[in-house]
């Protein structure tokens, strides 16, 4: 078993290996009493010519790594070992005036470090070395492509969770904060890496494990006390960021109007949940009707947690959204109705644009944010009234104008997206960007006409659904070309 190594100043940073994940399986056992997760992940990977695969893994205990069933060498460079760097930055602070510059430099260094794979796995074997030698002498192997695909299994555990996955009493849940999937399972945590997932979670028999994709079956063990395993399959390729998990003593409320939708909450909030989600099937059907397509992930699940347990007000995953129970209300409450409807409708729209359809490049993220907001505005107009939609658009535009006067970042700027390492999409600036994106798309719809614009969105979804196409990304340039073609 290789021990975690401390990166030394003279060590070169491991570059991205160029590996491609075809499929990933995650099999975990969750102990809420010990606040511990243990199990393994198995990846089907196209190994690059160098024979080294680089994965992202943070705050994990790596027990062993196997390639095609055989133990292999690996090196693990935990990013959280920052004692030496903290001393180095502390010594660089010569005065209070220089503290801000030093802190900014340390923060940028941490962001750059996060981009680098830190679990390096040797995937070369004797047969592959002999094959490389043959090729160097001009002999080509007909099984080259097949032998280049390896099954990599990483046995690991997670203790003392700090981010990515969280324990609160008998509730466990993940969050999709930027580059935090690696904090609870090894993966290639990159927006360009998409694959299908098989997911298995073993929990106490009185708990429910909710995850992405379709629930295939449940297995109750013969242990004492018994434990239950939930098996999910996600057949739509997604990035690791959109893999989510919620475990707890949830009450399950199937939607009365649509069997593909399930709502879940803690037992004390069940009466509020029944009242809150009565409208939800209308948003689900409206999006399917407008885009002329079925929901891409088959089933959709909403889990509502207590506010003190949640890290953010909403966490998106493929076919799953985790929200706080603050949005739930009973029949005596009127004021909260509109805000809750809009929040749940926006969470659903992000499934279409953001999780299913993804940005082609970081500077295209504004477009997916805008399209999700555009769908939400359609729901507001149809079910909450045109006056409500106009008022909210007016308030959002005022905020955008005020931000632009103070020098807000351009929406589609490759330099700003690269320099900000994805942080431009979070916080108040992220909200301003979303509002501005929606405003631009509504201007575009008005210029093209509602019918033309709707056909363009339908064409984008139709292309993604095609079995002959694996392309599910969207760029600003493509939308512009479609606009030009639609004008003729």
Image (cartoon, rainbow, N blue to C red):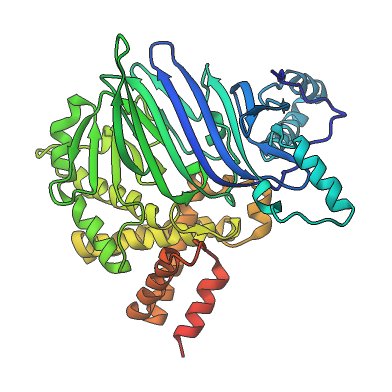
Whether 421 is drawn above or below 14: the answer is below
For the residue pair 4 and 263, the one nearer the viewer reads as 4
Q: Quadrant of residue 329?
A: top left
Outermost residue to the top: 224
Q: Residue at x 44, y 64 (%)?
A: 467
Where's residue 295, x and y in %? Answer: 31, 57
Whether 209 is drawn above or below 358: the answer is above
Q: Residue at x 26, y 23 (%)?
A: 249
For the residue pair 253 and 471, the one nearer the viewer reads as 471
Left or right, 110 with reference to 404? right
For the residue pair 230 and 82, the one nearer the viewer reads as 230
Whether 382 is drawn above or below 106: the answer is below
Left or right, 338 with reference to 349? left
**Tally of marks:** 0
User: Looking at the image, can residue 75 be seen?
Assistant: yes
Q: Residue at x 30, y 9 (%)?
A: 224
Whether 213 is drawn above or below 164: the answer is below
Where's residue 2, x and y in %? Answer: 72, 20
For the residue pair 351 and 294, the one nearer the viewer reads as 294
User: Looking at the image, can residue 171 be seen?
Assistant: no
Outermost residue to the right: 137
Outermost residue to the left: 332
State the quadrant of the N terminus: top right
Left or right, 259 with reference to 422? left
Q: Residue at x 36, y 25 (%)?
A: 309
Where's residue 251, x and y in %? Answer: 20, 29
């Amino acid at each position: 078993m290789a021990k975690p190594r401390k990166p030394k100043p003279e060590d070169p940073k491991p570059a991205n290996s160029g590996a491609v994940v075809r499929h990933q399986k995650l099999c975990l056992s969750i102990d809420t009493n010990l606040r511990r997760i243990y199990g393994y992940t198995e990846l089907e990977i196209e190994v690059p010519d160098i024979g080294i695969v680089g994965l992202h893994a943070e705050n994990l205990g790596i027990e062993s790594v196997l390639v095609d069933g055989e133990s292999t060498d690996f090196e693990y460079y935990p990013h959280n070992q920052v004692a030496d760097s903290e001393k180095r930055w502390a010594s660089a602070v010569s005065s209070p005036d220089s503290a801000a510059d030093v802190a900014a430099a340390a923060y940028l260094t941490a962001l750059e470090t996060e981009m680098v794979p830190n679990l390096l796995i040797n995937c070369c074997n004797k047969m592959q070395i002999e094959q490389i030698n043959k090729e160097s002498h001009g002999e080509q192997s007909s099984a080259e492509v097949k032998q280049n695909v390896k099954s990599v299994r990483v046995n690991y555990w997670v203790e003392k969770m700090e981010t990515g996955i969280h324990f609160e009493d008998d509730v466990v849940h993940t969050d999709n904060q930027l580059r935090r999937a690696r904090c609870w399972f090894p993966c290639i945590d990159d927006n360009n890496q998409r694959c299908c997932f098989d997911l298995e979670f073993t929990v106490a028999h009185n708990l429910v494990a909710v995850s992405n994709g379709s629930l295939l079956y449940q297995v109750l063990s013969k242990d004492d006390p018994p434990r239950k395993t939930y098996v999910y399959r996600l057949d739509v390729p997604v990035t690791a960021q959109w893999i989510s998990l919620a475990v707890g003593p949830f009450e399950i409320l199937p939607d009365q109007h649509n069997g593909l939708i399930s709502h879940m909450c803690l037992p004390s909030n069940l009466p509020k949940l029944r009242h809150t989600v009565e409208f939800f099937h209308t948003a689900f059907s409206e999006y399917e009707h407008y885009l002329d397509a079925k929901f891409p992930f088959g089933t959709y699940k909403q889990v509502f947690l207590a506010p003190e347990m949640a890290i953010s007000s909403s966490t998106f995953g493929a076919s799953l959204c985790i929200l706080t129970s603050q949005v739930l209300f009973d029949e005596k409450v009127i004021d909260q109705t509109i805000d809750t409807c809009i929040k749940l409708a926006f969470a659903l729209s992000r499934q279409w644009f953001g999780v299913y359809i993804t940005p082609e490049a970081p500077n295209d993220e504004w477009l997916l944010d805008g399209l999700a907001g555009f769908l939400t505005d359609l729901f507001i107009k149809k079910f909450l009234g045109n006056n409500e939609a106009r008022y909210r658009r007016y308030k959002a535009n005022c905020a955008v104008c005020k931000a632009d006067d103070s020098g807000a970042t351009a929406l589609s700027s490759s330099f700003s997206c690269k320099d900000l390492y994805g942080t431009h999409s979070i916080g108040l600036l992220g909200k301003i960007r979303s509002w501005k994106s929606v405003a631009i798309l509504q201007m575009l719809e008005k210029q093209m006409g509602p019918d033309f614009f709707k056909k363009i969105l339908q064409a984008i979804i139709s292309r993604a659904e095609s079995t002959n196409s694996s392309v599910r990304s969207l760029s600003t340039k493509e939308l512009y070309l479609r606009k030009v073609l639609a004008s003729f």
